[in-house]
Image: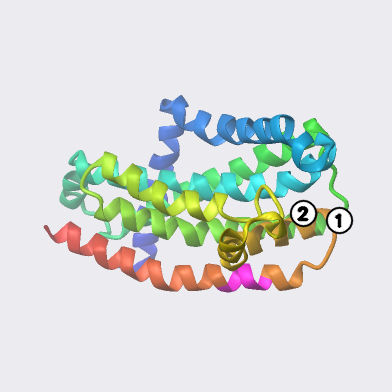
Amino acid sequence: MTPGRAARHGVTLAARCLLHLRHSPGQLLDMVVQPMLFLVLFVFLFGGAVATDWRLYLQFVLPGVLVQAVLLATVAAGAMLNADLTTGIFDRFRSLPIARSAPLVGAVLGDSVRYVLTTGVVLAFGVLLGFRVRTSPLAVVAACALVLVAAFAVCWISTLIGVLARTPQRLQMLLALVMFPLTFGSSVYVPTGTLPGWLRVWAELNPVSALADAVRALLLGGPAAGPALRALVASGLVFAVFAPLTVAAYLRRMRH
């Protein structure tokens, strides 16, 4: 099969993934409502305690919530792929004259649209609450692009777990073990300098902290090159490790 036909099959199955959004409103709630709830909860419940003024804390925390929301959205790729594998839909795919890679490519491409939507929702809601960008439109585009690149890399972790997990319950447990330490043990909600010693070490090594710091600098001003480079290098390493592992695990499972 030619690469062009394989790409068309992948795009077709990506469109199938997007149709799930129309027929499953609950997925839209996870993408839209959950980030809003996180933002409202932390800004109005903890903002006064963290920064004495919730408006100041909103400026600090919104870039972090943007990073967390988009990274958590990558969970959907693994969940959808696992559902297809465990409910027998992949048996039907194998009987169709399509590229064997198409279901995997479709899951990743379709999920990328979710990341764009989540990014737009968080930024728009933050502006409604009072968040103000202090840099340029080009810097905003760069911040969004950086988040999307990181999400694309992280989604390969989610898809690998989705391929390996034998039940949806195990999938949820494994994804929680990976995503929560990465997103909450970082500078998303508080500066790393305020954390206790052992947690501060983890947060400063955590690439999610570099991503949050880079997005914060691009939206509010400040040195962005260092943390952005760290975030890009980490994204490249994650992709280089987990994309081949995912493809190998996927092909092995398709043979059985």
The residue that appears at 79% across and 31% down in the rendered structure is 128
Q: Is residue 45 left or right of residue 138?
A: left
> Residue 124's mark?
none
Determine the residue positioned at 62% across, 35% down. 38
The stretch drawn in magenta includes residue 223:
no
Rendered-image quadrant of the N terminus: bottom left
The residue positioned farthest toward the front in the image shown: 197
**Going 79% across and 54% down the picture, which residue do you hit?**
219
> Left or right: where does residue 96 sit relative to residue 4?
left
Q: Which residues are magenta?
A: 229-233
Q: Are marks 2 and 1 in contact (CB under 8 Å)?
A: yes
Circle 1 residue: 136
Amino acid type for the residue under numbered disc 1: Ser
The quadrant holding residue 245 is bottom left
Q: Is residue 31 left or right of residue 85?
A: right
Kindly state the secondary structure of the residue where label 2 is placed: helix
Q: Which mark is residue 140?
A: 2
196 is higher (above) or lower (below) than 126: below
Measuring from the top left, give residue 36's x and y in whole percent. 64, 32
